[in-house]
Image (cartoon, rainbow, N blue to C red):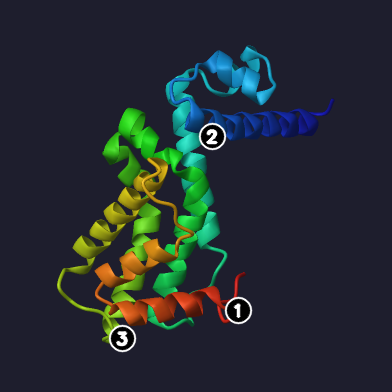
Amino acid sequence: MTVRGRRRDAEENRDRILRAARTLLARQPAASMDDLAQAAGVVRRTVYAHFANRDELLAGLADKCSADLLEALGRTDRSGLDPEVAMADFALTLWTAGEQYRLLISLAESDLGMAGLRELLHPIAAQSRALLERARDSGRFATHLPVPVLAAALQAMTLAMMQAANDEWWADDGTRAAAAVLVAAGLPAAAAEEAIRRAMSQDVAHA
């Protein structure tokens, strides 16, 4: 086998392990590396070749979650959208993409810590702050909090709503969560609902 072929196989094995870890740890947070090897359909040695220990595995999984969330957010060009529609689309996309990565919250509580979670979500938070700044400039949003404080509050609220979904307190397709974010940002409820409707329409072009 060529060097390129071996490299491709190694990358495929790593992705397979991370996909299996995402599914397994969502069901069994205390699952062992042996459990993971079995779930991924590889031998234990293969798991340890990529991740020397559980901490490295969790860090790799968290990095992939964060990267995939950013990739999902990057599929839409929001620069030409009205600010409230851009924010609605951002919230909806984050919720939909985050559905499969709610494990990040569990990892933050048990392994990463909130500081680790904030670091992972920093690029996403930066996008949120930029959208809020544009929304403020439009004059359509309230100015009751400084943008960095409001962005942090909205992020914390979104994580809390995702955790509530983890705990099966509610089920949401993202529309109620997005409405909550827009209202908390200072947009009237009726305007928030209209922005969500527009964001979900064909007017929003995805890259």
Secondary structure of the residue carrying tag 2 is helix
For discs 3 and 2, the disc positioned in front in the rendered view? 2
Up/down of 145 relative to 2, above or below: below
Q: Which mark is residue 22?
A: 2
| Residue at screen point 28% across, 60% down | 154
Q: CA distance from mark 2 to mark 1?
A: 32 Å
The residue beneath circle 3 is 138
Q: Depth check: 75 or 156 in front?
A: 156
The residue positioned farthest toward the bottom in the image shown: 139
Q: Earlier in the sequence, mark 1 or mark 3?
A: 3
Left-right relation of 26 to 187: right
Q: Earlier in the sequence, mark 2 or mark 1?
A: 2
| Residue at screen point 65% across, 32% down | 16
- Inspect the image, locate mark 1, and give the three-letter code of the amino acid beneath it: Gln
User: Residue 93, how many percent across, how many down?
Assistant: 49, 62
The residue beneath circle 1 is 202
Secondary structure of the residue carrying tag 1 is loop
